[in-house]
Amino acid sequence: MSFDLTPGEDLRQILEAARAMLDSHYPVARLQEGMGGDDLGPLEDFGAFALALPEESGGAGFSIVEEAHLHVALGRHLVGPGALATAIARRLDAGVTACIGVAGDGTWTLVDPEGAVHAVIRVDGGFGLSPVTDPKTTAPLGAGLPVAKMARTGTNRPLDADLARLLAAAQLLGVATGARDLAVDYAKIREQFGQPIGTFQAIKHHTANMTLGIEMVSALLDMAAIALYDGHPDAGFQVAALTRLAPRIALDNARTGIQIHGGIGFSAEANAHLFLKQAHVLAQFIGPADLLSLPAPLTPYGGNA
């Protein structure tokens, strides 16, 4: 292993600055206003899309590990999927703005396509970059997130599938964490039988299980990011393992968060439902992972591979 898991000063500074920027420009409460897709300008100014690009290509020169942690923060704030797609697409085209998409029968379903010139499409077990041409708007997703259909085209440049899945899984970890934090905050102020519901053992069990799931995905994310950074032979397996767990934990935490909120959790007045919807969008984009077709780790990290 060539990477120290202890957060260094650079990573701490990046995440502190990112949290301040996200709190200012992307508070979760903004989604209650049904504003549609997010403006990526503040993220662009922050340098989020160039963080892991080489310095000779105009990037900041950090690694995929730092970029993954940044995307956890984006997921926690439910930043629109255009940020994920743009970060992936920048590996091929500098300055491009993209949306995510999933292949269907003869069409591609695009999420948040407004202003996007390219789409990162999950198709045929991998990911490709295709120009957005003549999209037909359909019914929006929750929080006014635009959706469009587009005819499948032959122009589809291949993208790094492991990178795409890793960053999507990082955002799913952020969704799981945000759902847990929202539930914990609510449990501290909602009173029943004269005391906060957070003092009840059943609620404590739920939030503890949510935290266990977060820690499992966090450990897998670090291992997968380091494996990709090192070019380790089992990097694909590590990413696939992460891909299998991250959507499940995000969906479970979002659903449990709704239950902890009680009746209001099922209403549009609370923010709990927003985490569930974001988890579904990212889970559809990340797609299934076939662990059995990939080489498993046979040599301990740090040993002689």
Image (cartoon, rainbow, N blue to C red):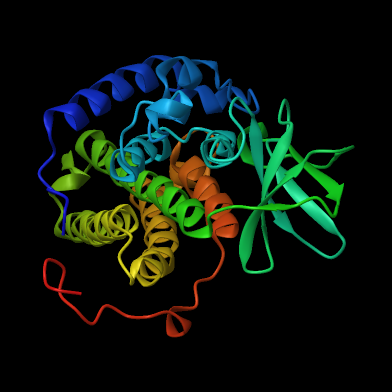
Q: Nearer the viewer, residue 231 or 190?
A: 231
Residue 238 position, x and y percent, is 34, 67
Q: Residue at x 45, y 47 (%)?
A: 263
Where 120 sits versus 40, above or below?
below
**132 lies left or right of 143:** right
Would residue 121 be found to the left or right of residue 202 on screen?
Answer: right
Quarter the C terminus occupies: bottom left
Quadrant in the rendering for residue 251: bottom left
Residue 268 image offset from top left, x and y in percent? 55, 37
Q: Nearer the viewer, residue 251 or 259?
A: 251
Q: Residue 194 or 197: which is nearer the viewer?
A: 197
Quarter holding the N terminus is bottom left
**Relative to 21, is 211 above or below?**
below
Residue 28 can be seen, yes or no: no
Q: Give the farthest residue toward the bottom.
A: 292
Q: Position of residue 72 (x, y in %)?
A: 35, 41
Residue found 16% across the figure and 68% down from its top: 301
